[in-house]
């Protein structure tokens, strides 16, 4: 298979961690006979330095012309960087919003997986963790409260702020289809999270999700209210496979789910559009405090590349090979500084990438 990948290393630790993910992808290419062609573009602070804007039209066009994007992270030290003395739409993170919008990436997937080797980092009690958990949060990314009309005005002498939460059935259907497609590649269970006891948008959400479920007879669908879901995540996380939800609920629940894994350097993510195209990136930021020191954990980016293999290229076997290689290296006791534990061997970014690639 031939795949065109746009690389956006970005700022801070971005170039270091993307380099390790490319190393792993190349090993997959050699082992399974695929060709990955890379085109690199600038986004974030490095693009501001070169072109005066965080994302150029040309960079966006290049990303659009490829099959998938692998992103490191963008941004600098917010309190101490020239990139932040400008209007918000010229700051590094504006590049992220522009590329998500420009590529119509409406579906955000964040896995929360507990590695048994890292179980001590999980803040939950052992009896709650049980055999561990392995879920993905599928969050709608371009609708709902964050994109509705908003204004603040004085009403009868009282300041009043209004935010509107709107979803139409098309927006709900397309994210539900993605969630069921992904469930078919996993344990075939979808938990749709809403607030249907209060919100009209949630009642429409539930109706459309049930319609979509009819096309996936193998997938079991359950509904859960968002407040209950927030509790269930810390009481019984093992019950979840695919959690499907709207923008704001997903924002909050995906952070909660990532926290219970215990390590930010391990968390991958993907944002997809209606086709197979996706942008893949670690859930963490550009970590300017550790940039250039060969200490960043590249695993979240390597696992994001595995998601790319699975969701954009349908290379399930290859994605599993990357995930297994990560587990092997952890089982052998190798750790970057952020996940270091007693009795383990501390290694740097480059060596972690080397070891994972070697074990494929
Ligand atoms: P951050 O995720 O960059 O860092 C938080 C803490 O986690 C830091 O101590 C950092 O050293 C550590 N950390 C993060 N990733 C790590 C890794 N792979 N290995 C080891 N340690 C790691 O969050 P922040 O400090 O709030 O933000 C720093 C910059 O990143 C800001 O400019 C912010 O806007 C930007 N940011 C970008 C993205 C993105 O590009 N998607 C996301 C979040 C933040």
Image (cartoon, rainbow, N blue to C red):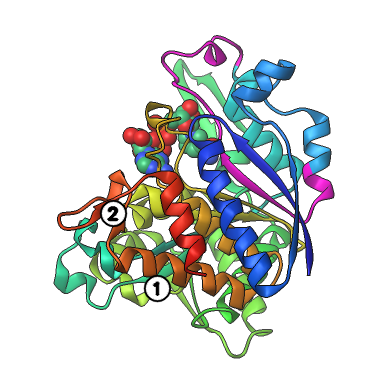
Depth check, mark 2 against mark 1: the one in front is: 2
- Which residue sits at x=23%, y=70%? 129
Quadrant holding the N terminus: bottom right
88 relative to 276, above or below: above
Looking at this view, is 135 or 300 the one in front? Answer: 300
Q: Image quarter for residue 32?
A: bottom right
Tell whether circle 1 marks a residue whose Cβ is less than 8 angstroms from ligand 1.
Answer: no
Report which residue position mark 2 lands on: 262
Tell me: 133 left or right of 32.
left
Q: Which residues are magenta?
A: 63-87
In the rendered image, is residue 200 in sight?
Answer: no
Characterize the local packing of mark 1: few (<14), some (14-19) or many (20 or more) Cα atoms within 10 angstroms. Answer: many
Residue 230 highlighted magenta (yes or no) = no
Q: Position of residue 188 (x, y in %)?
A: 52, 83
Q: Position of residue 60 (x, y in %)?
A: 78, 37
The structure residue drawn at horizontal position 35% and vertical position 76%, both measured from the top left corner, is 239
């Amino acid at each position: 298979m031939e795949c065109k990948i746009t690389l956006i290393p970005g700022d801070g630790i971005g170039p270091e961690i993307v380099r390790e993910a490319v190393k792993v992808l190349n090993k997959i290419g050699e082992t399974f006979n695929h060709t990955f062609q890379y085109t690199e573009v600038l986004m974030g602070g490095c693009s501001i330095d070169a072109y005066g804007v965080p994302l150029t039209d040309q960079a966006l066009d290049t990303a659009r012309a490829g099959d998938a994007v692998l992103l490191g992270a963008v941004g600098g030290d917010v309190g101490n960087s020239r990139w932040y003395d400008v209007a918000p739409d010229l700051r590094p993170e504006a590049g992220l919003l522009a590329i998500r919008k420009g590529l119509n990436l409406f579906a955000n997937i964040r896995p929360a997986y507990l590695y048994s080797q890292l179980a001590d980092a999980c803040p939950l009690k052992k009896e709650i963790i049980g055999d561990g958990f392995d879920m993905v949060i599928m969050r709608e990314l371009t609708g709902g409260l964050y994109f509705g009309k908003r204004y603040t005005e004085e009403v009868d002498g009282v300041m009043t702020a209004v935010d509107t939460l709107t979803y139409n059935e098309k927006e709900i259907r397309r994210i539900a289809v993605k969630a069921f497609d992904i469930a078919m590649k996993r344990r075939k269970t979808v938990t749709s999270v809403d607030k249907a006891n209060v919100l009209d948008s949630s009642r429409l959400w539930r109706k459309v999700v049930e319609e979509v479920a009819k096309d996936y007879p193998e997938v079991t669908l359950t509904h859960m209210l968002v407040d209950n879901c927030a509790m269930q995540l810390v009481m019984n996380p093992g019950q979840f496979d695919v959690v499907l939800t709207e923008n704001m609920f997903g924002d909050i629940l995906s952070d909660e789910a990532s926290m219970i894994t215990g390590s930010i350097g391990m968390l991958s993510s993907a944002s997809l559009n209606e086709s197979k195209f996706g942008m893949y990136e670690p859930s963490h930021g550009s970590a300017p405090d550790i940039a250039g020191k060969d200490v960043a954990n590249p695993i979240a980016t390597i696992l994001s590349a595995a998601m790319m293999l699975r969701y954009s290229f349908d290379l399930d076997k290859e994605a599993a090979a990357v995930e297994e290689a990560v587990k092997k290296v952890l089982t052998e006791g190798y750790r970057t500084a952020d996940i270091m534990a007693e009795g383990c061997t501390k290694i740097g970014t480059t060596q972690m990438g080397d070891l994972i690639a070697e074990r494929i």
